[in-house]
Amino acid sequence: MAQALLNVRIERKHFDAVTVLRNIDLHLDPQEIVSLLGPSGCGKSTLLRIAAGLERDFSGAVSRSEQGADVAFVFQEPRLMPWLTVAQNIGFSAGADYDAPWVRQLITEVGLDGFADALPKQLSGGMAQRVALARGLYSRPQVLLLDEPFSAVDAFTRMKLQDLLLQLAQHHGIALLLVTHDVDEALYLSDRVLVMGSQQPSSIRLGLDVPLGRPRDRRDAELGRLKGEALTELQLAHVI
Amino acid sequence: MASTPYRTRRLARFFSAAGLVLGASIAALGGAHIAQAADALPKELRLDYAYYSPTSLVLKHFGWLEQSVGEGSKVTWTLSQGSNRALEYLNSGSIDFGSTAGLAAVLSRANGSPIKTVYIASRPEWTALVVAKDSPIKTVADLKGHKIAATKGTDPYLFTLRSLEQAGLSKNDVELVHLQHADGRTALEKGDVDAWAGLDPLLAASQLQAGSRILYHNVNFNSYGVINVTETFAKQYPQAIDKVITAYEKARKWAQENPEELAQILSKESGLPLDVAKLQLQRTDFSNSQPGAEHIAALKAAAPILLTEELVRKGVDVNAVVDQLIEPSFSKQAVAAK
Amino acid sequence: MTSKSKTLPLSTERSWKPAFDSAAWKRRAKGLVLPVVALLALEFVVRIGWVPPYQLPAPSDIALTLRDLAGGQLWNHIGASLLRVLSGFAIGAGLALLAAAWVGLSREAEAYLEPTFAGLRAIPSLAWVPLLLLWLGIDETSKVVLIAIGAFFPVYLNGVAAIRNIDRKLVEVGQMYGFSATQLARRILLPAALPGLFTGLRSGMSLAWMFLVAAELIAATKGLGYLLTDGRETSRPDIVLAAIIVLAVLGKVCDGVLAKLEQHFLAWRDAFTGNSAGPTEN
């Protein structure tokens, strides 16, 4: 049994007097895609940040498997450095001497050929988010953490970017832990969907398995049925 | 994009309107200068007083001018810290009578200021080049490459230039630091400059209080204390000039007859000790107050320095300037009338 | 599966057009209208005698004076003033950048230093003069220090504001990569603060010129401020105006240099330029 790539156990996380997370226990296996689904304010972004190591003030533990799984983070906004070109942004972690051929390859993979020297002000929202994805992939991580990565773009771009994400994950053998409030997105992308409620302190109310193969068809009836289950649970949790 | 005829017309109209407004406002400003009918006395008679002009202090102290004009005019007094300031006030229309050095008035007139010298307040030896007590500098020629504090546009400054010329130096051979008289004295005593072109009473004070040593003095390089008015004022208010000169004559006579009290007044006004006042008055001569041949000759002899040191524009006829500056008529009239 | 956007929303390149750019020149011409009209009006007014020339010389006279000066000592004066202004600016702006970085990045430093700086900032320029003359004498030191003080505060203020205004989200990216404090400062904070810093530098430069004139009005032996007093003390208003014109030109040139640098280093800015179309000036 392969050891989990990433283990997140949170006993308690609070901001001042308010406890937002309690008794979280989740794991991520290699090449697995897991979504955290829940409404705004339920703490899922906090949970992701803890998993990324951006939040350290909590009681619990985050552990990685012995390979020391590299973790990369993709934010909700592209957060590109406006003074750097697309290529420089992708290679940002390495600084001035980034791996140019690798960056070029990533640019092609995310579908931005020819834009290597463009500045962020010249990009649309969707294009910028592609750069952010490429940046996340630069360090060849084993785990990619994404915080509502496509919530800022329109529905059609979102679908294209979701397909791109799946392609990248498969091509590079990356595990994904994804935060989203979009039920369809969660089901389309993930192997497992973890539903979180809106009552504080939050915990994971339900784990839905999505045993469908890839590539998935958005029109698949099974996805529809699973969506029903998820919606029921969200209703029970008084989220909707 | 080609400008249509409509746009051009609009533009032309805008500019004509703007031009009219601009012209009208300038006319209004200029009109303010043009005098009304010549009255006997102006509503306000604005004089200056200075510590280098002891009779001005006497006049201010006793109020003889105020008595003379009575209700006809209000007399105001402004302190001039040097010829440069007095000329500035005179040229800007802030005072009507300015007390300056003769050569400073020539300089101003040569540069276009329409002023007239109507009275000689005194013949002082009020300036000299001084160095600090223990200075190694012994002659004027030693000043080459050194710092001299001198107030531009005043007699000490012109004295310095003439002394340098005599020693074969020009103003580019030294560093002339422009400081008003009081600051120049401080700079000398603090050691920030190597020499100072002093002016009484501060010169006397520096000698007596700080032990400063006179490096060079020359009574002929001093150019009289004079009183100036603008040409416009002279045309408009000759009677006022008459009254002021008469009052000054009274002060002058009094000064000659009461040297002790004069020293007291000078000391009190300038805030300097009595012995300083006395030293200044020792080298001041009140005997000849009428602008005449003597003064014209002395100023003409001094004037070339203005050209050689490029203080006036090239090609200015400084002799003609002196002739235009000196106006003996008012003084003659006032003295004859007595 | 993946898609490409077909065209860029904005043009990538802003190529330099070597050909005559009539739109740009038309714009510059508009800027010249006001000064030219004013000069012509003044010339007219003085020549017909409405304003006496000993109070306001005609522009043509001032031009002649400038020509005379240019053949003589003017270049020495310009050199002296430039040297003072540039050294004072360099010192003041340099110190201000360091202080701004320190205060901007450290809450502790801000708590200790900011109130003192706020108090010092309130002191008007001319109030420093007698103090500096007393402590540092009438030489170059007091002048350069005065100018440095003038340049310091705008650069400091804008620097601190620029650092405080940096988008926290960008800093987080660096934190995510595990950047050290120095790395964060060098790779994210400095470039992100650059727009604000440039504003501060241009402001500091213009104040440096202002303080230069204040310094040279008192106890100078050369420089443009000295030339100004020369004109004043010898009843030469044409020299006064000539000195002012030279000061204005030099000040504008210095600002222009900074503006060009700003344009070069901040080409990446996604900024509002006032007009959507047309080439951006300056």
Image (spheres, rainbow, N blue to C red):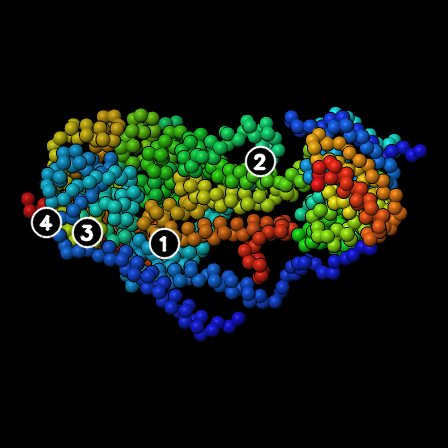
Tag 2: amino acid: Ala
Residue found at the far left of this picture? B338
Comparing marks 3 and 2, which lies closer to the viewer? 2
Tag 3: amino acid: Phe
Tag 1: amino acid: Asp
Chain letter of mark 3 equals B
Comparing marks 1 and 4, which lies closer to the viewer? 1
Chain letter of mark 4 equals B
- Measuring from the top left, give residue C17's x and y in whole percent: 63, 64
Tag 4: amino acid: Gln
Mark 1 vs mark 4: same chain?
A: no
Q: Please name the residue shown 11% across and 32% down the image.
A: B257
Q: Please say if the residues under marks 3 and 1 sit with CB atoms less than 8 Å apart.
A: no
Residue found at the far bottom of this picture? B5
Q: Is residue C162 above or below residue B35?
A: above
- Measuring from the top left, give residue B68's x and y in whole percent: 10, 41
Residue C100: mark: 2
Q: Secondary structure at mark 3?
A: helix
Q: Write down the residue under mark 1.
A: C238
Q: Please say if the residues under marks 3 and 4 sit with CB atoms less than 8 Å apart.
A: no
User: How far is disc 3 from disc 1 in space, using C-alphas?
Assistant: 24 Å
Q: Is residue A57 left or right of residue C145?
A: right
Crowdedness near tag 4: few (<14), some (14–19) or many (≥20) residues, C-alpha within 10 Å? few
Mark 2 vs mark 4: same chain?
A: no
User: How far is disc 1 from disc 4 in space, using C-alphas?
Assistant: 37 Å
Q: Quadrant of residue B177?
A: top left
Chain letter of mark 1 equals C
Q: Can you see residue B323? A: no
Q: Write down the residue under mark 4.
A: B333
